[in-house]
Amino acid sequence: MKSIALQRALIPFAAAAVVATMSGCGSQISESEADTVSSSAASCVDTSGDSIKIGFLNSLSGTMAISESTVFDSLSLAAEEINADGGVLGKQLEVISEDGASEPTKFAERAAKLIQQDCTAAVFGGWTSSSRKAMLPVFESNDALLFYPVQYEGLESSDNIFYTGATTNQQIIPALDYLAEQGTKTLFLVGSDYVFPRTANKIINAYAEAHGMEIVGEEYTPLGSTEFSTIVNKVRDSGADAVFNTLNGDSNVAFFRQYTSVGLSADTMPVVSVSIAEEEVPGIGLENVEGQLTAWDYYQTLDTPENQAFVAAFKEKYGQDRVTSDPMEAAYTSLYLWKAMVEKAGSFDVDKVQDAAGGVSFEAPEGTVTVNGDNNHITKTPRIGKITSDGLIETVWEAPEAVEPDPYLESYDWAAGLS
């Protein structure tokens, strides 16, 4: 697997860096907990009883809670369904939940706890790429499994992470292709200031150069920022054909409200977003985002038997007013994929699960997904959606078939050197 040998060689240094970052940020972590993050230990997973522990690690507080708390809900639904159907290898799932609190250092700390103190067989969660990057050395040094459910910037693979959200060629590039087909010649880039937007926009700049597009502006703001007056004025004054939005969390609320306040709309300057899904629309205000575009691989409105069953089960459990979204569906799917891997392996042992993973498929709400054993990503069907007057998202374009994951963009000549 590409870069794994290098990643493993860097594990002690990466883990130490995580600990140093924790100390520098004033995070409340004891010396013993810091040792836990950086040390490698034999698995303590207990398979002797009639249950098996798994971990859910999501931001239930902080700026990312608007998105991640819903992922926790869909994971909980999947665990409940699996238990009702007999569990995994005959064992009931015992969920240990931790709050990542929208802080990468907290994600690393809580991941270590779930692996070494709670002895979970696998962990499901994370959202921002900063949280994933912080957790990666923890999972690798402990030879544990993380199932990461959110679209991301690509240029990564790990034996210890299964990526069930879209990688770049399954979301960002299809969105750019769609914009190009619509005649877009100029783009303004707006993003939160961390790993995903910075890397995504590096890729977008390379795409634009190769396809005759012009990037007329590129602005970043701290994650959680609520002040966008200067940025939206720059966006308006740029005269761009469209905006590519990689803001994350509740910053989208402030951005779209201020974007609307300066007279911009989907008709005058459309925005394509890669981190706004159905559950964010009410918080932003439908009046601020109606008609805007999104790029995902799943929408609640997909008309498949599997999705109808998923939506009905979710609403029955959480309320008829609740909606589903791409990251929620990818998280739900991740638990079923892990179940299938374990049952194919006939074991909860990490090495055996990794060996069994390639080719494992699941009839997911988004369509059939299959694990690529070379890079631990899954096949996905890219879809462009438009936010409608009922607050849902309707598909306006979709790929004719599921797309194989290409996290390092090796099949794109214009992306040479990006990884």
Image (cartoon, rainbow, N blue to C red):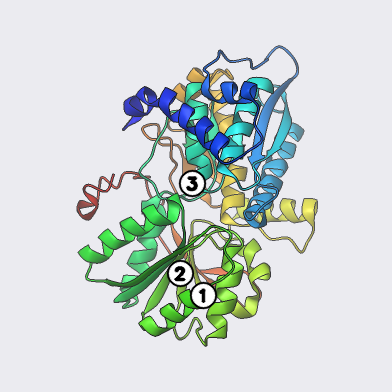
Q: Which residue is drawn at 43% across and 35% down?
A: 376
Q: Is mark 1 on a helix, strand or loop?
A: loop
Precedes in sequence: disc 3 or disc 1 = 3
In contact (CB < 8 Å): disc 2 and disc 1: yes
Instruction: Locate the C terminus by quadrant.
Output: top left
Could you tell me residue 306's position as x and y percent? 61, 50
Q: Quadrant of residue 382?
A: bottom left
Precedes in sequence: disc 3 or disc 2 = 3
Type of amino acid at the residue the image marks with label 2 = Val
Name the residue beneath numbered marker 3. Answer: 129
Could you tell me residue 22's position as x and y percent? 56, 36
Q: Which residue is drawn at 42% across and 32% down?
A: 158
Horizontal arrangement in the rendering, residue 372 relative to residue 94 (left or right)? left
Type of amino acid at the residue the image marks with label 1 = Gln
Instruction: Locate the N terminus by quadrant.
Output: top left
Horizontal arrangement in the rendering, residue 59 relative to residue 384 (left or right)? right
Horizontal arrangement in the rendering, residue 270 relative to residue 227 (left or right)? left
